[in-house]
């Protein structure tokens, strides 16, 4: 089984001069993008720059946590005898159609 995956880790041509600058550009831009993203998220988490209920770009947060929070708010509102309304807008549809 190990021979099956060996070709995935082969270096095609170790001499970077044999690659065009355009093909190197996407590699370097993705590397810089990941570095900046990791540093920014770490900085924002450390200094509490994200809103409390933001789920994107945060560790231990996902769409599921956002939906659980929304569901909890709707159930709590209903339990208090109040009326809860949820309005969902498709911004893409409004902007481009």
Image: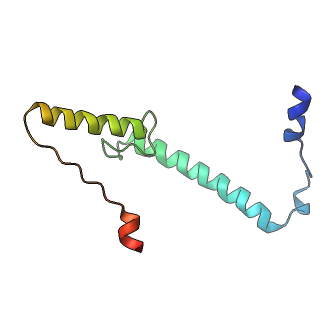
Q: Quadrant of the C terminus?
A: bottom left
Residue 80 is situated, as x and y percent measured from the top left of the image, at: 8, 32
Q: Residue furthest top?
A: 1
Q: Residue visible at 39% across and 42% down? A: 55
Q: Residue visible at 39% across and 67% down? A: 93
Question: Depth check: 21 or 4 in front?
Answer: 4
Seen in the picture, residue 75 relative to 47 is either above or below; the reply is above
Q: How is the image coloured?
A: rainbow
Among the 4 quarters of the image, the one containing residue 8: top right
**Left or right, 10 with reference to 33:** right
Question: Depth check: 44 or 66 in front?
Answer: 66
Residue 19 is situated, as x and y percent measured from the top left of the image, at: 87, 62
Seen in the picture, residue 30 relative to 7 is either above or below; the reply is below
Seen in the picture, residue 23 relative to 80 is either above or below; the reply is below
Q: Residue visible at 41% across and 41% down? A: 63
Question: Depth check: 15 or 76 in front?
Answer: 76
Residue 3 is situated, as x and y percent measured from the top left of the image, at: 92, 30
Q: Residue visible at 35% across and 42% down? A: 48
Q: Quadrant of the N terminus?
A: top right
Among the 4 quarters of the image, the one containing residue 43: top left
Q: Residue furthest bottom?
A: 97
Image label count:
0
């Amino acid at each position: 089984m190990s021979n099956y995956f060996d070709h995935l880790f082969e270096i095609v041509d170790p001499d970077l001069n044999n690659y065009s600058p355009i093909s190197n550009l996407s590699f370097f831009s993705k590397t810089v993008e990941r570095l900046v993203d990791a540093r920014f998220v770490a900085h924002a988490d450390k200094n509490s720059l994200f809103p409390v209920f933001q789920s994107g770009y945060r560790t231990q947060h996902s769409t599921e946590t956002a939906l659980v929070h929304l569901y909890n708010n709707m159930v709590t509102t209903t339990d208090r005898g109040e009326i809860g309304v949820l309005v969902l807008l498709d911004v893409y549809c409004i902007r481009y159609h």
